[in-house]
Image: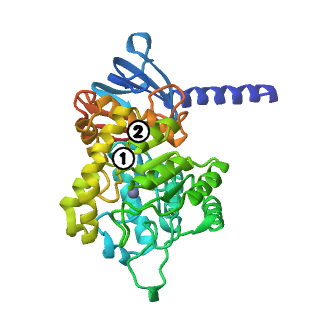
Amino acid sequence: MSGRGLMVAALLAAWIFATEAVAQDTAYVRAGRLVDVVDGRLLSDRVIVIRGDRIERVAASSSIEIPDGATVIDLSDATVLPGLIDMHVHLIGDAQAQGYENLAASLPRNALHGAANARRTLEAGFTTVRNVGAGGYADVALRDAINGGDVPGPRMRVSGPSLGITGGHCDSNLLPPRFEVTADGVADGPWEIRKKLRENAKFGADLTKFCATGGVLSKGTNVGVQQYTLEEMIVIVDESHRRERKVAAHAHGTEGIRAAIEAGVDSVEHASLIDDEGIRMALERGTFLVMDIYVSDYILEAGEAAGFLAESLDKERIVGEAQRSGFRKAHEAGVRMAFGSDAGVYPHGINARQFRYMVRHGMTPMEAIQTATVHAAELLGWPDRVGAVEAGLYADLVAVAGDPTDDVSLLENPRFVMKGGEVVLRR
Ligand SMILES: [Zn+2]
């Protein structure tokens, strides 16, 4: 064969190989029903064309011809939704070891718990999470291990250590001074704060989490009391936004919630004791609320068995019900909401249990689903990647039996999960 003939043969072989590779790389998902979270409606008989890890096309089944021999995933008896997003999880560590029990685990052990928790979360239909607070950058390591294909898990955006004042909710207050324990994210005053945030960026954090008020699970903090000053919060937001990082503020108390919103945070987490003024401010600024309105029941039920401090149970009794009425009021007023469960306080994998609480406290099932898809994607800064079933986005899908826009608790039992075009679970 001449040199030219050889080249033609090589090109032909490459062409045949490429054609086959494309065919193998494409899958057709038949969806009996599809939740259109962008327009808030339920569609029937759709086909989702997936190429590689992305959605290529979504259309009525009558308008798509599926080629012979193509890979078809038949979910024609199910309802398909975008992969779910949880904006407030703690994957690192063991949810069953709270309080003093928590001190016994090494950082590597906690990171390995994280790997197991990541798998459970993904199999529960949550294909993306925002991890808010982890010591030693174990969250960065887990995110990278998942992205590298070493362990299965959801897409992660991570904060690294949560910033907090000395002795505040984001510090570690369990041991006396001779043990010299300070949590990784402790920073007081503008320059310590800026340095800490620069460190977080250096070591791979995607966003900022800080503690604006006391919290339920920390020792010696009062949930109602503001911790960082307004001046410090403004610095946190300035330094984070300068680096195009979103800011999530843990805040239970009324004053701390208002200060965080005034400082310009992107989301207020918990928002338990939010008042009318806080709601008005959130509306005006477009601040998201991420209200974990299931977790209270778990804390009070699991109680001491999980190692929660007695003072934590007392505090939960104060904030739990108040938070639910605040949730109803804020939603009625039209404040933007994103789904966040605080999984890690309770065992991972039951994140979806919160949906029925959201419906019980004022949302329609569709509204609750939107908080965990299209709205969460916006707060993440990833509307071009996740949160809807649309061309160009990652092929992250969940399917359930029945109609979740009628009975949202169906989301607690996904029958099918796909992340980036790969089937994670099918039953
Ligand atoms: Zn939390």
Residue 325 in percent (x, y) is at 27, 43
Q: Residue furthest right?
A: 3
Which residue is labeled 2 in the image? Answer: 337
Residue 163 in percent (x, y) is at 52, 63
Residue situated in front as seen by the camera: 423 or 339: 339
**Which amino acid does the dot numbered 1 rest on?**
Met
Q: Residue at x 59, y 52 (%)?
A: 237
Q: Is mark 2 within 8 Å of ligand 1?
A: no
Q: Residue furthest front?
A: 277
Which image quadrant for residue 202?
bottom right
Is 270 situated above or below 216? above
Mark 2 or mark 1: whose residue is earlier in sequence = 1
- How is this picture coloured? rainbow
Residue situated in front as seen by the camera: 159 or 421: 159
Residue situated in front as seen by the camera: 330 or 4: 330
**Which amino acid does the dot numbered 2 rest on?**
Met
What crowding class fits label 1: few (fewer than 14 Cα within 10 Å), some (14-19), or many (20 or more)?
many
Kindly tell me whether residue 247 is visible in this rendering: yes
Q: Is mark 1 within 8 Å of ligand 1?
A: no
Q: Residue furthest bottom?
A: 178
Q: Residue at x 27, y 34 (%)?
A: 362
The quarter of the picture where the N terminus appears is: top right
Residue 40 in percent (x, y) is at 38, 23
Residue 27 in percent (x, y) is at 44, 28
- Mark 2 → mark 1, Cα distance in angstroms: 8 Å
Q: Residue furthest left?
A: 301
Q: Quadrant of ligand 1?
A: bottom left
Which secondary structure, mark 2?
Answer: loop
Q: Which mark is residue 291?
A: 1
Which secondary structure, mark 1?
Answer: loop
276 vs 267, left or right, is: left
The answer to whether mark 2 and mark 1 are in CB contact below 8 A is yes
